[in-house]
Structures are given as structure tokens and as C-alpha cells.
Image (cartoon, rainbow, N blue to C red):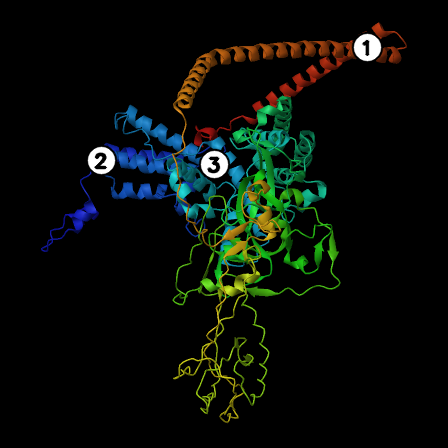
Amino acid sequence: MAAKRAESDTPIPSTETNQVDGGSSIVTEDEWKGMSTVMNAIYGHRMEDGYDPSKIFQRKVNKRAVPDYYDVIKEPMALSIIKQKIGAKEYKSFQDFVRDCALVPYNAQVYNLANSQAYQDALEVKGVLESELKKLVDEKVITEEVGTLPYIGEIPDPDQAVAEEDEEEDEEDDEEDDEDGEGEGEGEDSEDDGKRKRKRGVRSTAAIAKREGGAKAKEDPAAKANDPESRKKRGRPPRVDTPMEARIKAIMKGIRKPRNSLNKLMVSHFERVPDKAAMPEYHQEIKTPMAMDLLKRKLKRKKYNSVDQFMQDVELMFENAKQYNEDDSQVYKDAVHLQKEARVIAQQEKEKPDNEYVMEEGRLPMPNGILHNGELWKVGDWIHIQNANDLTKPIVAQIYRTWQDAEGGKWVNACWYYRPEQTIHRFDRHFLENEVVKTGQYRDHPIDEVVDRCFVMFFTRYNKGRPRDFPADKEIYVCEARYNEEKHKLNKIKTWASCLPDEVRDKDYVMDLFDAPRKLKKVPSPIAYLLKDDQKETDDLPKPEWGAENAPPKIGAVHRRPRDPKESPPPEPTPTPPPQPPPPPPRQISSIPPPATNGYSNESRMDYAMGQPSGQTPIPAPTPQPQHIQPSYTPQQTQQYNQHSASPVPPMQHMPASQPSSFAAITPHLPFATPQPTHHMAQYATPQTQSLYQQNPVRAPPLGYKTPQPVEVYHLNDHANANIPLEIRQQFHCDEQGHVLFFTAPPIDPQTPPKEGAALGHSARYLAAKKKREALLAARRKAEEAERPEKDRLAKRKREEDDQKFQKAVGDLRVKAMKFLENQLAEATAKEYQVLFNGDVESGVEATVDRLAEMQQTQAERNKAMAERKAKDEASANVPIRGLNVTLDEST
């Protein structure tokens, strides 16, 4: 029908048939039949147990059920689509058909884990496809080149994929712990939960993005370093495993590899403890359940002190399975096999030396902490780290890892906490005094960058007391929220323990409680003044200003975007007390009267008398109108947050902003003159009863008045000044307290007196001697460079000889120790036999040997009987039942 419609002779020229046709097909009739044969073979293929591996690939993946599938797989394909194309004869060449068929297993291998059923089904379908294409090649229907599956893209290595997924699961566990404390009920949480609840066999998009992103980073590392957005990526603490932890991970990795006769991973039975609601009988019989996820969680929580302690839980896991399941069940058989495999791997790992478990880049973990400047810095400590963008505001952080690199340098990995002015938030957001917010930034720092100790308390305890024995001169911060640096959102923390390292989550600190809980006060944003008048609710989120590479933003930003429904509105401002009425006007004005207080503003004005001819009446003061001043944010509000900012010497007095006047200023029409000693009576206009304020007349300043000189010298506060090494401070001008002085302008260059006489210089003899000495030094350096290879060779040879001597000495000691141990064992055995057999050692040994031989013979007979019984059972199970000319085996 489609072909007839395409060939229909319509009187109106049309291009529709050309668009549908898209080019002539070169597929022959035999090739069409071959396509159908391949599809029928894939649809009809069954495993030994009757399982259909093609069933999962017969329909496209439901986008509602698995929305992220289409984010990862760019060319979705299903067997039904291929079958439909064959029926409609849409393929233009046989290569197009082969590529569509190859897409089916390729997509499954990319999206799913190597240990998932979908991955195994894809391999089975791929094998059937290759087998059927080979048959067509043998039948000369297609060429070998056409029948070869094309290269579509990279397929993750199974072992690497499992390792990546294990790492990804660890990170997801960490993020679950972190996000468990967030008070954000938005859709993103439900979306994350949906991803966590999906099938275990699915490879996470984060793991795929990590692989793709890693390749891009290798391609262009410079672009990544120069991109400020790359600094916002959420990180995790680096893996710094001790040899014991590395051995445990190797054992867990080895347990995950074996497969049973059904080509399924044996460990799949032991991933999680059976659900108590679904299998209550299991929990009634098994009192101490154990599974792989519990092993991994205990390892992550640093609960194991040795490999043997870990192996006790492994043995418990398999013994539980053997106790609950029947002896002939697949779970029982897999448990027996994995138990033996785990013991072998554990023994192999324990025999390896510790130096085989050195982490990447030569990292050597230091679980007991780092001793630096006479103090021990360990995991869980709150610290101040040097801030390259602002030395006066060190980075608030908590230590998560401690290690030593290959060169002997000590390092810490710490989680940053941002100050409010380093975040992006709504302009009317309020913060607690001394508040910080937790970020997802986990950064590496040399131990030399650690400045001092500090402490961060959860807001529920901050108002109740302070940590006991914590130095009074150290900073204590309060934390209420975590900062999502990608979405620029502040989410309230529910559980403080989820924000701490695993090693200290179970620990608590003692507090000195206040007499009564204190009320926490919130203050406006310290950067609210950055809001521009033209900003609107529809604007994009602003970006922070970045500076140094390994430092927080120099300053954040504010916006007017709509407030999140879950976000609390800003607190109501404290009402301003009513202004005091001004005192009654004086009857007489002196030449320089005292300042009069304006009841509406906190500004003080000085009334200066103007010189006037004798007998002239002073200008009366007009009655001011009430003013309505709109409150606004000014940079002065940041003073309470800038505790580390530079201060002038002497301190600068901040003058309040002048209030705008609602009446025109009075301009005197007479020139200024020296005030006369005579005084004149002031005439005042009758004030209106509605007005509560009186404005004094604006006077011109006296001729001798001088404005205050601007501050020209500043210094840092004590904390920032102490961060500058003493030897550097001594090279600059300092005040009496040792503060380095910072000047706002360079010093005046005094005129240098003219130099008289001949210019100073070296004599010709000195210059010649200097040149000769330089030549000798150059010759000596050249000779040393020529001799260096020989010296290096001799030194290397000596090191090799010393190493050989050392190895020989170690070998001799090992032989000597083994002989000594053998002698001790022989003596102990002889003594034991003398005690057991009353001195008749020889007869005791003979009796023991006879007993062992008898036991071995009995065991051999038992094994033989079991093998015969097993063979008999298998033979009886394979008896075919024959019907009318066709056996049931043949029919299946």
C-alpha cells in the first residue's frame, strides 16, 4: 500500500514522495529475508532454564519510569523498532540494519552495570546477533565487512565500571548522610530519592558524567583551570586508605567477581539484608543479620580495627545464609564458594607488605593526626585556613583527611564553611551574628596554611552554652544552613551529625551552659548594599567574584528573585523609639551658639552667626515640614561583619549621612565678616501647632574653621597582624603595639642634594680580578658537571651493594629464625607427647599417625560414596520421557 501511494500520479507536483523516500534502497530480497531471519533468531532464543534474554529489549524504555535514561543514551533503540522498519522496508542498506541491531546491546552495556541482569542479557543478545550474521556471511548473502558489528562508542570496562560504581555508591551514601539534614522539601529531593530507589543494576549518570568529564578535562586542562564555574562543583574528601582499609576493600572487590553456573554474580544474594516486613521469618531465625551494604557502611564509619575483625562479619554473613537456606539451594552453594574465596583472598592480602597499598600520588595516611607547630591537628578539628583573597577573613573549615605526600609534605583535606558575604542570596535575607554556612567544597591544603583553631556550633546549641575548656581568644561560629553552590540556595540543616566526618559523628563535646538560653539575634545581610536599583525579580542569578584558585569567592552577590516558598520571610524590624521634642528656642543668640539638636535626625548642626551691620534684624528661621525618610541599606551596616577589617590609626569617626531637607536653604545676601561683640534679640516666627520639630537656620561656618584631616595611616587588627611573620613585620614601620602601618599615599620625595666630585666606581685592577675569579668559578663548575655522572654512578653502585648486603642479612636472619622456630616447635611437641604418653614418645607418635591415616581413609570412602550418589541422582534426573515419535527434550 505504501508503495502504491508513493507511485500515485497526482496532477499537482509534490515533493512529499521524495522526502519519504529519502533515496533508493540497495537492499536485495535475500537481504530482507536475512534481516527477518536474524530478528526471529533473537526473538526465539532461550537460555537453558527457558529464560528469554531479549524480552527487556523488545520495547523502548519508558521515559516516565527511567527519565535519566534518555539523558545518557542519545540513540535509543528497541527490537520492535527494528522489526517495524523491516516490515515497512525502510532500510536503505544492510549496514543500517546491522547498526540498529548493534545499538540494542551497546545501549544496555553503557547504561547498566556489569553485574546487572540487563547487562548479561545484552551480552547474550549480542552473541546471538553475531552468530546469525556469521551464518549470513557463510551463505554469501552479505559480505564479512557488512556482517561485522560497527564501532558505536566506548563501552566502560566491567572491572573499572564496578569500581566506579562502588565509589559512586560511597559518594551517594555520603550525600545521603549530608542531605539527610537538609530542610529542603523541594522537588529536587524527591527527584534524588527516586534515583536512589531505582534498580541496583543501573549505572548512575554521575558515574558516566565522571568518565566523560574526565576525558574532557584531560583534553583541555587549561580551560578548566580558567573557568570559575568549575570551582563550584561539589567534591568529596579524597580517598586516603590505610593498608588495613585497602586490604578490606580488596577482599570485598574479590568477593564481587565470582559467578555461578547460571552466569549470575554470587554476591547478588548478599547485597542487602532481607526486608523485615517481607520476610519476618528470616529475622526470627537469624538474630544477627549481615550483608554487603552493612560491611561497606561499617568500613566507611571506621568501625574495623583489623582485617580479622572484618572477616568475622564476612563469616557471619555466609554462616547466616547457610543456616537459613537448604543445602541444595543455589544461595547455600554460592555462600560456601564465596566463604572459601574470601578466606583465600584475605590470607593473600594479609601476606602482602604495607608498601603495596600506597595510595595515588604516594599518599601515606596519617590517621592519628599531624603534629605541626607543637599542636596535633586531626580529623574533626575546626580550623582557620589562610584565605589568599583576604588575609583578614581566614577560611572556616573542618578537617576530613590527613596524609603525607611522597616528598614528606603534610596535608589536610577540609570542608569549607562560607561567611554570609561569600554567598549569593536574596537581598533581604537575615543571618545570625557570627554565622557560617556549610558548603560542598572539600579542598586540600598544606598543613602550613592552617592558621589557628576555631569552633562551629549548631544553632540549636549555640544559644545554650559554649564548649568547655575552649580558649576564650578563639573564634566560635554558628551554623544553621548548608549552601548549594550550584543553585545558590541556603537549606536548613536538620541533623548536625550528617555534616561531620564519619570518625567523629558518634562523639560529642562537653558544654558550659549559660544560666538561661540566650535569644539569637538575626541581622541584615552584610552585602545588601550591593543591590542595584534596576535589579528585577526576573533577572538571572548573579555570580560571585572569584579570586585565587584555592580560596572562597572574594564577595558574593544579592538579588531580587522571588523568595522560595520554604524560605522564611525576614524578621520584622525593631520599631524605632519616638523622637524627643526639641528644647524651646533660646531668647538670645550668641555669636557662636552651641549646637542645637534636631529631633528628627541624629545629625548635629552648628549654628554660625553671620556678621551684619548694627541695627539689622537677623533672618527668621522658617518652620520645617515633617519628612518621611525611606530606610535603606548602606555600606555602614557591614561594620558588624567586618570584624577583621583594617582600622585607621587613630580610629576614624564615621559621620552619619545627612538627611535631605524639604525646604530651600537660606542664602545670606551679606558678605561674611568678623562677628560683632554686640548681641541682637532673635525674632522667631510663631510655630505651627501641628509641627513637633523646629529647624534652626542654616548658618555659614566661621572664617577660621578647618575641616578634619583625612586619615592617612591604617593598621590591621590583632588577628590579621599576627598572621604576618615577625621577621617580615620588623622590616616595615610599626606602631608601639607592633602593628604594621599602612599608608594611603607614598612618602614625599625630598629633593636630594647635588653630588659633588667624581663618581664612585671600581678600579681596573679590581674589575680584572673579579673577571678572573668568575672565570675560575666557571671552570670549576664545568669540571664538577663533567665529574658528576661518574660520582652518580659510583653512588648508585654503592647503594646497590648496600641493598644487596642488607637483603642478604635479612635472608640469613629469616633462615635463622625459621630454624629456631622449628627447634622450638619440635621441643614443644616432644614435651607435649611426653606428658600425654608418660614418656613413651615413639609409641605416641605412631598412634597419632595411625589415627590420622584411619581418618583420611574414612573421609576418602565417604567422598567416593557421595560422588557415586550424586552421579546416580544426575543420571536419574536426565531420563527423557518419550511420546509419539517426539521427545519432550526435542519439543523444547
Q: Mark 1 points at which residue?
A: 827
Q: Type of residue at label 2?
A: Val
List x then y, in percent, for residue 570.
Answer: 54, 68
Q: Nearer the observer, disc 3 or disc 1?
A: 1
Mark 1: secondary structure: helix
x and y percentages locating residue 232 in the rendered image: 47, 48
Residue at 46% over, 81% down: 698
Residue under pointer 2: 27
Where is 366 relative to 180, above or below?
Answer: above
Amino acid type, callout 3:
Tyr
Mark 1 vs mark 2, CA separation in Å: 87 Å
Taking 844 as reference, is 747 left or right? left
Element carrying mark 2: loop
In x, y percent, where is residue 17? 17, 49
Decide: is 136 above or below 237.
above
Mark earlier in primary sequence (3, 2): 2
Image position of 246 with respect to 442: above or below: above
Can residue 106 be seen in the rendering of this structure?
yes
Q: In this view, does 770 lie to the left or right of 638?
A: left
How many other residues sit within 10 Å of disc 3, few (<14), some (14-19) or many (≥20)? Answer: few
Residue type of the residue flagged with mark 1: Glu
1 or 2: tag closer to the N-terminus: 2
Work out how far the residue at label 3 is from the one at label 1, CA to CA, in angstroms.
63 Å
- Label count reads 3
Residue farthest to the top, as pictured: 842
| Local SS, label 3 | loop
Position in image of residue 44 (x %, y %): 39, 35
Residue placed under numbered mark 3 in the picture? 51
Say left or right for 501 vs 838: left
